[in-house]
Image (spheres, rainbow, N blue to C red):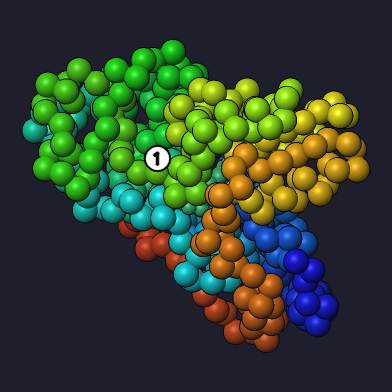
Amino acid sequence: SPSDPDLVARARAAKEKLGDKVFVLGHHYQRDEVIQFADVTGDSFKLARDAAAKPEAEYIVFCGVHFMAESADILTSDDQKVVLPDLAAGCSMADMATAEQVAECWDVLTEAGIAEQVVPVSYMNSSADIKAFTGKHGGTICTSSNAKKALEWAFEQGEKVLFLPDQHLGRNTAVRDMGMSLEDCVLYNPHKPNGGLTAEELRAAKMILWRGHCSVHGRFSLDSVNDVRERIPGVNVLVHPECRHEVVAAADYVGSTEYIIKALEAAPRGSKWAIGTELNLVRRLANRFAEEDKEIVFLDKTVCFCSTMNRIDLPHLVWTLESLADGKLVNQIQVDPETESFAKLALERMLALP
Ligand code: 13P
Ligand code: SF4
């Protein structure tokens, strides 16, 4: 939908007034009306790196979700302030692993006599608490663009991996990229005693997958893939690794949001693509590449936007920028120093991956 011209003018004026004091980051799932004001756009990995690359900016306005803003706060200096335009922009997947549940899981692994062999690998899409747990126990963070490297690193450190909180990214990476079998993976359910697993099952597993998922990507199904192949002969199916295993197994290409964009940039004229990721990004790509005669469709029309990503809209961005321009700090995301120090360990291990 076209942005309100009055709000566009106000956002522009406030941003101009702030000048170099503000740096606006935009995740690829953000609305068009917001992304037009981003100084840099990217996937979770790129934005984590870029947040730390502007030490002169007093305010980092993060147009994305809460865990991304937390990570930016952890990676930036103490005098830089990270701001999330709407504090209700969370992530249902990140909420699926709480600090208490993960501590309990570690007790279960200890009880089964395997904690010493386990290296935690946590997806970026997790709270700062979970990242701190990961750092404390010798593990690393990963994103969808470096999950394979993170797992390779982890299996050099120990014999087993506890992968949090996205079971799909964990399973897809283990099976598709690391040559493991589905039987090497077990699913730890935080709502069941002992995760719903016996000590024998835990001892036999290589990958202990947390039972979390993305509510958006989890809705693409094998039928979505089969239907689009029938509808559009010759279509290339390109999906995000947060999709379920059977969807990823049936797809032609799999990768992060940044990978998806690059793949479409490199695609030949006249090619046809069905994309399984968040709708704001797919629509933007469909519009952008229509001129180059690349046909881009959404993998499944019944799937909708990420509702929390969509919470960041132009009115929230205008309010944020105008407040900051008036010298009023709003919606700061601040991780406490104890959590930050351990979470930073885990994030820095990720940034140091080859
Ligand atoms: P990437 O941008 O790293 O592919 O992550 C997708 C996502 O779900 C962010 O919430
Ligand atoms: Fe979380 Fe999924 Fe939304 Fe990404 S798309 S923020 S993983 S709910």
CB of mark 1 near ligand 2 (< 8 Å): yes
Residue at the (51%, 22%) spot, across then down: 249
Q: Vertical placement of 1 versus 249: above or below?
A: below
Farthest right residue?
291
Q: From this viewpoint, is residue 324 visible?
A: no
Res. 289 visible in picture: yes
Tag 1 secondary structure: loop
Taking the spot 91% from the left edge, 43% from the top edge, the residue there is 291
Residue 154, given in percent of the width and then of the height, sits at 38, 25
Picture quarter with the N terminus: bottom right
The C terminus, quarter of image:
top right
Looking at the image, which residue sits at the far left? 111
In percent of the image, x 30 and y 38: which residue is there? 210
Quadrant position of ligand 1:
top right
Q: Nearer the viewer, residue 31 or 127?
A: 31
For the residue pair 172 and 74, the one nearer the viewer reads as: 172
Q: Position of residue 243 (x, y in %)?
A: 49, 36
Q: Residue at x 52, y 33 (%)?
A: 223
Residue 58 to residue 155: above or below: below
Q: Is residue 5 left or right of residue 213?
A: right
Residue 240 vs residue 130, the one in the foreground: 240
* Residue 242, image x, y percentages: 49, 38
Q: Quadrant of residue 140?
A: top left
In the displayed structure image, the side of residue 73 where residue 39 appears, left or right: right
Q: Residue flagged by tag 1: what amino acid is it? A: Asp
Residue 131: image x %, image y %?
38, 47
**Label 1 sits on residue:** 166
Judged left or right of residue 112, residue 265 is right
Is 267 above or below relative to 14?
Answer: above
Question: Picture quarter containing residue 261?
Answer: top right
